[in-house]
């Protein structure tokens, strides 16, 4: 547990500046107001929107809060805080099967737009799985970005796991084909597939992704499938569109939320959970291998709402 | 309708206003509530939105509107003016050194904003101006960052200076300057590692480069998709190391790019360029006033013309734009412009800059011209007689059968293409109206 505590401390440290503002406004709202009135709701709306939770989800949350206030005869603004925390926690909680891929022979496809931290995430995941005694292989199917393959290879070396790649400009589906067969031959437990960053509105690139997806389905039907979309924690409402468009091409099973060590609040995760029902499975708060952790709803929401972690 | 673009949204709002004729106080309020929602969904910072809607409300409720003959026009005008006010109206460029002084540019930003790619793109721009740029690899932390810069530098035919990843960035920067002086480089662009604005040590590193080298331009590279936090990031970078300008990347996505608006509003620093795609040529001069009018759905026709002029010869551009305006576009034009369009980044990229085209229409058109199908389309057109190419109306079923056989394709594919062609043409027919009534004269479509 020691590592876990330090991780959450790091998250809290990372979020401090943000959190200070956030908590300050939260405190101001929950303790400053004596009545639950329209001004109270308006202030609350501002704080939630500033956290990137988004207009729509904020409205949903506030509507639920209004209902609860009416039904449960909540009189004190401070009681609203408990209600909000519990509601968001409940929404964000992961089911028991969330990390099933770790126990099976699996292929983890990692997708996302440019610059969100896909390659770094794969490097970290590989390191973690390897440390847990798994046989891991990474496939560099990003054949587009200059030196992406070198970057992944470097991560593979650091984690001492197998690496399969192809030359710049080659067909990514072919790389995946090679990787799948190599993984089968070598008895690999988890094959992690890195893909090129693509803007979700580029049709050709999205077609290419679906080709990669089909290659895995066809060549490795017995493998347990996990498709993780990596989202930059600093991204605003466009992350919703990204998740939606990507889910049209592949079955996304979870979200990796990166770069939460800055001042962004990652509230977009709450919006995505609420609107698309996609769970956050990992969050990243830094650049070392230890800085990627399984998502824990209680700790995440607490880190956002409480002054002391 | 969950993911309408800001321009679609605002167009929707104002269409309702229009149908009501005379504008009342509550109309202004309803409209501005929608504007507020749309801006927030576009990730414009909450405080900026608040300030913006207050200003517009104040102005809209003033006597001008009440006395005006067409109140709807006034609201759009005010919203547009305020957007332009926020974005600034002047085009700003890199500051070049005078009297033989080397122009120094330092690229800074968060991880994954697109610094390395943008650095190489910028070098290409600078080179086109007849300068001799040197790229300096100061990102010693991210694996393979140096290789990425070297590969992109090579593509742009620009030299990259690197001391590997074992030396301190300050030392690399200093030696790069000596190297530049000795070898006659007049622009030096430093690619630095991505860093968090709250990482004191890493921010000190940038400050120390600035202390040792006279940096003329510190450029913050920002992802256009950044959320509410864009304001914190840009103001912290500005406070700690001082920035002179901003480059917004990934604007070719479908993000509404509210971050650009927020950054400008909060830091007051100009946005110089916008990254519009993955090709190294896809870096465009940023026109703040046009960005504002694009947000309002008036399109960015001027940008299109400029882009066309730079990439294809002038005559062809004029011809094409005339054809588009008159909608006298036939299969010959389609064929000859296919090559040019490829240079321009595809038809969808052109249409994206036109007013009044929404994403679903875009998707339709894009479906017609995606790369693989281009070859088929070429085959179809080449299988037509000259008369058919000039007059698409000639195409009857028997002619289509002949064409399909000639192109080695299924008749269904020929039908699909012809249908899509006609749809595109219909859209082009609508465009001249919008273009005519748009920008300059500020005459509105009602």
Image (cartoon, grey):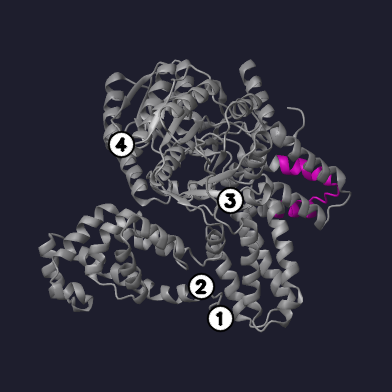
- The extreme front residue here reads B99
Q: Residue at x 16, y 71 (%)?
A: B400
Q: Which x, y percent locates residue B204?
A: 64, 26
Few, some or many residues within 10 Å of mark 3 (<14, 14–19, 20+): many
The chain carrying label 2 is B
Give the residue number, with chain letter if any, for mark 3.
Answer: B260
The answer for how far apart the CA atoms under marks 4 and 3 are is 34 Å
The chain carrying label 3 is B
Give the residue number, with chain letter if any, for mark 1.
Answer: B446
The answer for how far apart the CA atoms under marks 1 and 4 are is 51 Å
Mark number for residue B217?
none
The chain carrying label 1 is B
Residue A185 picture quarter: top left
Q: Which circle's residue, 1 or 3, is located before the other in the chain? A: 3
Q: Residue at x 20, y 60 (%)?
A: B378
Q: Nearer the viewer, mark 1 or mark 2?
A: 2
Mark number for residue A172?
4
> Considering the numbered disc 3 on the image, is that residue within a helix, a strand or a loop?
helix
Residue B396 in sight here: yes
Few, some or many residues within 10 Å of mark 4 (<14, 14–19, 20+): many
Foreground of the two, B397 or B124: B124
The answer for how far apart the CA atoms under marks 4 and 2 are is 44 Å
Placement of the N terminus of chain A among the 4 image quadrants: top right
The answer for how far apart the CA atoms under marks 1 and 3 are is 30 Å
Magenta segment: A63-85
């Amino acid at each position: 547990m020691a590592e876990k505590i330090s991780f959450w401390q790091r998250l809290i440290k990372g979020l401090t500046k943000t959190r200070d503002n956030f908590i300050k406004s939260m405190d101001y709202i929950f303790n400053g107001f004596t009545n639950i009135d329209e001004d109270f709701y308006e202030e609350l709306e501002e704080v939630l929107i500033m956290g990137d939770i988004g207009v729509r989800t904020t409205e949903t949350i506030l509507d639920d809060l209004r209902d609860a206030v009416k039904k449960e005869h909540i009189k004190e603004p401070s009681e609203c805080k408990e209600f909000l925390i519990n509601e968001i926690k409940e929404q964000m909680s992961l089911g028991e099967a969330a990390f099933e891929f770790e126990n099976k022979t699996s292929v983890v496809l990692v997708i996302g737009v440019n610059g969100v931290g896909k390659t770094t995430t794969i490097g970290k995941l590989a390191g973690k799985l390897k440390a847990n005694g798994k046989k891991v292989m990474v496939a560099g199917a990003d054949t587009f970005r200059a030196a992406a393959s070198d970057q992944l290879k470097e991560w593979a070396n650091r984690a001492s796991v197998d690496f399969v790649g192809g030359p710049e400009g080659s067909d990514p589906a072919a790389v995946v084909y090679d990787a799948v067969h190599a993984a089968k031959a070598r008895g690999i437990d988890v094959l992690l597939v890195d893909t090129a960053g693509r803007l979700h509105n580029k049709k050709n690139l999205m077609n290419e992704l679906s080709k990669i997806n089909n290659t895995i389905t066809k060549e490795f039907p017995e493998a347990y499938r996990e498709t993780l979309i990596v989202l930059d924690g600093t991204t605003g409402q466009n992350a919703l569109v990204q998740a939606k468009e990507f889910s049209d091409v592949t079955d996304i099973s979870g979200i990796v939320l990166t770069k939460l060590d800055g001042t962004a609040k990652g509230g977009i995760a709450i919006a995505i959970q609420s609107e698309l029902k996609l769970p956050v499975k990992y969050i990243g708060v830094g650049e070392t291998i230890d800085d990627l952790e399984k998502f824990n709803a209680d700790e995440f929401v607490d880190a956002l709402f409480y002054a002391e972690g | 309708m969950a993911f309408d673009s800001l321009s679609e949204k605002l167009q929707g709002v104002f269409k309702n206003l229009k149908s009501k004729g005379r504008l009342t106080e509550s109309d202004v309020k309803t409209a501005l509530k929608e504007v507020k929602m749309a801006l927030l969904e576009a990730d414009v910072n909450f405080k900026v939105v608040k300030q913006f809607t207050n200003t517009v409300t104040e102005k809209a409720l003033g006597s001008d509107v009440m006395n005006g003959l067409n109140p709807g026009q006034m609201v759009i005008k005010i919203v547009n003016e305020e957007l332009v006010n926020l974005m600034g109206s002047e085009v700003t460029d890199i500051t070049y050194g005078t009297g033989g002084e080397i122009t120094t540019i330092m690229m800074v930003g968060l991880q994954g904003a697109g610094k390395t790619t943008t650095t190489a793109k910028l070098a290409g721009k600078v080179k086109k101006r007849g300068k001799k740029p040197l790229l300096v690899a100061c990102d010693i932390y991210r694996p393979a960052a140096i290789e990425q810069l070297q590969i992109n530098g090579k593509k742009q035919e620009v030299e990259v200076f690197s001391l590997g990843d074992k030396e301190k960035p300050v030392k690399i920067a200093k030696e790069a300057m000596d190297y530049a002086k000795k070898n006659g480089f007049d622009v030096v662009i430093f690619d630095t590692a991505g860093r968090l604005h709250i990482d004191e040590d890493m921010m000190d590193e940038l400050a120390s480069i600035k202390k040792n080298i006279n940096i003329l331009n510190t450029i913050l590279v920002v992802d256009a998709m950044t959320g509410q936090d864009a304001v914190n990031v840009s103001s912290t970078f500005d406070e700690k190391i001082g920035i002179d300008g901003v480059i917004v990347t990934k604007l070719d996505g479908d993000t509404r790019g509210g971050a650009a608006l927020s950054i400008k509003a909060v830091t007051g620093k100009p946005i110089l360029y916008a990254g519009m795609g993955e090709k190294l040529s896809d870096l465009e001069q940023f026109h703040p006033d046009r960005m504002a009018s694009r947000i309002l759905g008036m399109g960015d026709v001027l940008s299109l013309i400029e882009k066309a002029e730079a990439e294809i010869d002038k005559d062809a551009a004029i011809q094409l734009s005339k054809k588009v305006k008159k909608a006298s576009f036939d299969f010959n034009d389609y064929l000859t412009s296919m090559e040019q369009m490829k240079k321009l980044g595809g038809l969808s990229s052109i249409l994206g800059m036109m007013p009044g085209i929404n994403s679903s229409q875009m998707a339709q058109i894009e479906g017609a011209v995606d790369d693989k199908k281009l070859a088929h389309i070429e085959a179809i057109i080449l299988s037509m007689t000259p008369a058919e190419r000039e007059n698409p109306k000639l195409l009857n079923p028997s002619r289509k059968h002949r064409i399909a056989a000639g192109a080695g394709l299924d008749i269904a594919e020929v039908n699909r293409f012809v249908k899509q062609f006609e749809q595109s043409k219909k859209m082009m027919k609508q465009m001249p109206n919008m273009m005519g009534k748009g920008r300059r004269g500020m005459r509105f479509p009602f």
